[in-house]
Image (spheres, coloured by chain):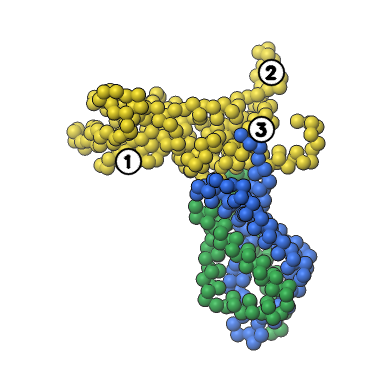
Chain colours: A yellow, B green, C blue
Amino acid sequence: MSDNTKITLEVFRYHPEGTGQTASKPSYDRYDVPFHDDWVVLDALNWIKDNSDGSLTYRWSCRMGVCGSCGMMVNGEPKLTCAAFLKDYYPKVIKIEPLVNFQVERDLTVDMEQFMEKLESVQPYVIRDDVNQTDDGEYKQSPAQLARYKQYSMCINCMLCYSACPVMGSEPEFVGPAALALGHRYNLDNRDQGTSQRMDRMMEHEAVWGCTFVGECSTVCPKNVDPAGAIQQAKAASAQKYFKKFFVPKGAGK
Amino acid sequence: MVRELTAVFIGGYLVFLIVLLSKLASGKQEFASLIQALDSPVSQVLHLCVLVAALWHSVTWFNLTPRALPIFIGEKRVADTLVAVVMGYLPWLVVSMIILWAISEDWFASVPN
Amino acid sequence: MSKSNEAFWWSLFSAGGVLAALCMPVFVLITGFLIPKLVGGKEDPALVFYDMFSSMASKWPVRITLFAVIFFSLFHCAHRIRHTLMDLGLRHSTGLLAAICYLSALTGSVFAVLALIRL
């Protein structure tokens, strides 16, 4: 490949509060970017920002699939741009858009507020009735107990699953794949004692029951979390809890 | 979406099954005409469509089972394919064989050859 | 934010999914292909089948099994069709949609019971 090989990126631009040269209506700008075998889409975006248009706005941080901030639609598919190689698209034009099912803040950045609220609502942290003091030592967990939830703890909150989910598109109130999988992750954690309060939220109509197991979330997940599987397990747990309340009198036990 | 569409075919077939049972309960004449109708191109084509849908439902259902019901032995999660075979495909085979066996028992008992 | 009875319908859906996955292909094979094959060449095939099926289906374990398969599978289909229609955008009168789907399944089940107890 000669040094001046180029690839074209068609990038979504939108500056809602923009003035002057930046139009306020959504549009697409084309950029010719140097093509290298080992470049990813994020490298190309950084090149654009450094060399041709400093106003291009997008999120990124680690460049290695850990931080979860560089998720975008690459040719209509939700992807981490740090893991989407240019050579997989060359010589075609690559279309870069912000993650769908979110409000666009500016260019390729989306508003994460609703996602954060949903995530918070499932209380994705260890809840204890009795909190150990430092002197009491750590909460014990065996490798087998860790294995139960480890897969679901790999989530990096990149939100690709929210863009892939067809339910998310038609039902914005749906709690969504990542948040539900993380709620389930803490329900599976032997150190946690908050399942029952967490389940109050997860059993709601817009929570686990919104999911129809299409499975797109798991297909696009860069960390193999399998949110779709986690949600089915949470449904089974919800169903158990639902039927239990008919047999166990109110207030008896927890 | 194809997976969801299987419900339409299976639902239609269930209606047929209910009709079949009703005719069986109504007596020989009614049941006989329906049985004769099964030996027709229309019936064959419809049954073929339902068979494809039913097989698709079975395969997709069994393949997704391990993700909804993961099984652990110690620290190891049992491989999805193994769970699908043990909890899905094997019982499927056994149930199908039992039903076929029960039918053939009665078939040979009722046909004096 | 609403409490949900979806757990109830989902449980029926799941039970029906399992039973349909296990039983439907072999049922279809029998009524669609084995019976027509055996009909050919018999002078009064329906008679043979009538005796055979009525003696078989009148056994109580068979009746109960048939009912379970039909009942749960009907609710499986009703639930799946309902959710598919909702995913396709039918979100205005979800209550009515649910009523139509589940009442159809219930009606089918009632007809199945009526047939099975008359056997």
Residue A228: mark: none
Kind of element beneath mark 3 = helix
Vertical relation: A10 (above or below) B52? above
Contact? badges 2 and 3 (CB < 8 Å): no
* Residue C93: percent from left, percent from top: 57, 47
Q: Quick one: quadrant of the C terminus of chain B?
A: bottom right
| Disc 2, SS | loop
Dividing the picture into quadrants, the one containing residue B17 is bottom right
Residue A160 placement, left or right of C30: left
Residue A114 drawn above or below residue A134: below
Residue B27 location, x and y as percent? 73, 77
- Residue located at (60% from left, 74% from top): C34
Which residue is tagged 3?
A200
Marks 1/3 in contact by CB < 8 Å: the verdict is: no
User: Which of the numbered marks, if any, corresponds to residue A131?
Assistant: 2
Chain for disc number 2: A
Which residue position holds label 1?
A88
Asked if marks 2 and 1 touch (Cβ < 8 Å), the reply is no
Between discs 2 and 3, the one toward the N terminus: 2
Mark nearer the N terminus (2 vs 1): 1
Q: Which residue is drawn at 79% across and 31% down?
A: A251
Q: Nearer the viewer, residue B45 or B66?
A: B45
Question: Around disc 2, counting alpha carbons within 10 Å, would you say few (fewer than 14), some (14 to 19), or many (20 or more)?
Answer: few
Residue depth check, mark 2 versus mark 3: number of the one nearer the observer: 3
Q: Which amino acid does label 1 sit on?
A: Asp
Q: Do labels 2 and 1 share a chain?
A: yes
Residue at the limit of the structure toward the top, as seen here: A135
